[in-house]
Amino acid sequence: MPSLTPVDINGVLPSSSHWRPTWPSYRVPVVLPQSTTYLDKPQFDAEAKLEVVSPCSPSCHKSSPLPTYEEVKDYLSYETLYSNGSRTETEVGIYVLTGGSAGTQSRSRAKRQIYGYDTRFSIFGKDFLLNYPFSTSVKLSTGCTGTLVAEKHVLTAAHCIHDGKSYVKGARKLRVGFLRPKLKDGSKGANISSSPEPERMKFQWIRVKRTHVPKGWIKGNANDIGMDYDYALLELKKPHKRKFMKIGVSPAAKQLPGGRIHFSGYDNDRPGNLVYRFCDVKDETYDLLYQQCDAQPGASGSGVYVRMWKRQSRKWERKIIGIFSGHQWVDTNGSPQDFNVAVRITPLKYAQICYWITGNYQHCRDG
């Protein structure tokens, strides 16, 4: 195994300045499966929760000690749940070690996710809903949101299918919903442009073949090691045939265009609507982005994305750089403050998720 050396939080290679907000280059580590064992079938007895609350503030995360190499390997090892109810546990090896944060403290729940004037936009009409980037947002049968990141893969929050101790009841027959036009004449023609105007949208559902959840989430849940590992990847039983959004390593907040992020989700206070929002990043740790984007339960699992210039291809490109997780109520210098939180796709998480998608680490070298 190559020597393991810590990598700076940004992992950015030097590059010349450019007037466009440009995707940085990263030294992406290698995360490879080492051994896989079969586990007993899960009970599917947890209640699905559309949000997860953690009490650890940005300063709490920043002051936490970096995990050891063995701890990081344990956190990035993962469970795979299959559609027949069986599951496996896979241990991984890491060939470049990057830092992270761990550790939280317990605190009572609090709930407030709209900050002042509600700045969310409901997206209506097939011309928007069926077009990129809004068409990459999908709904999970457990009530959360996910994002298309490959031809058969959906990225979402781990708590949407697992509460940290057990799989939720709806994970037994997990499905992913795609908005489609419901045609006035009831026909199912694939050529939407030549069909009658739809009276409203409906969901077409595809079953999930298998699900990957990191042990960092299963090991402790939010009250133990925080939201750092609140992400999961779903593999569909068949391709969805839509344009998807690539994943990318999360740049530092100061490198984001305008310091701003975007995401769309199915907030439960607006049933049947896809809700889009954008806002400034207020703070960050190695694993989390703190912001006050207006959001409600149901938006959990939404892919947080930005649009930046891709120097190699000389074009603008949107990438998923995080997964919207939930809410945090924290004390900031003795003054209460709350945030909505997204899990950042770090170089290690990028390497892991990319390998889950492609099965070949050689395809996961460019974050």
Image (cartoon, grey):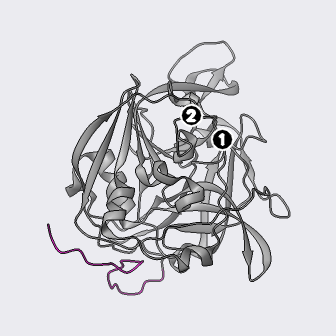
Task: Place residue 290 in its image quadrant.
Answer: bottom right
* Mark 1, residue position: 49
* Mark 2, residue position: 168
Which residue in the rendered view is the most extreme toward the right?
A: 117
Q: Would you say 211 lies left or right of 140 here?
A: left
Q: Nearer the viewer, residue 249 or 39?
A: 39
Crowd rating for badge 2 (residues with CA inside 10 Å; few <14, some 14–19, many 20+): many
Q: Quadrant of the C terminus?
A: bottom left
Which residue in the rendered view is the most extreme toward the left?
A: 1
Q: Is residue 118 above or below residue 170?
A: below
Marks 1 and 2, how far apart in space? 9 Å
Residue 199 locus on image (x, y percent): 72, 24
Residue bounds of the magenta highlight: 1-19
In the rendered image, residue 6 lying in the magenta stretch gets the answer yes
Q: Nearer the viewer, residue 26 or 124?
A: 26
Q: Secondary structure at mark 1?
A: loop
Q: Secondary structure at mark 2?
A: loop
Q: Going 41% across and 77% down the picture, which residue do you hit?
A: 10
In the rendered image, residue 258 lying in the magenta stretch gets the answer no
Amino acid type, label 1: Lys
Q: Going 22% across and 55% down the picture, which residue do you hit?
A: 361
Q: Is residue 263 above or below residue 315?
A: above
Whichever of labels 1 and 2 marks the residue nearer the N terminus, that label is 1
Q: Is residue 246 above or below residue 5?
A: above
The label number, if any, that marks residue 318 in the structure image: none
Residue 305 in view (yes/no): no
Amino acid type, label 2: Val
Asked whether the beta carbons under mark 1 and mark 2 sit within 8 Å of each other, the answer is yes
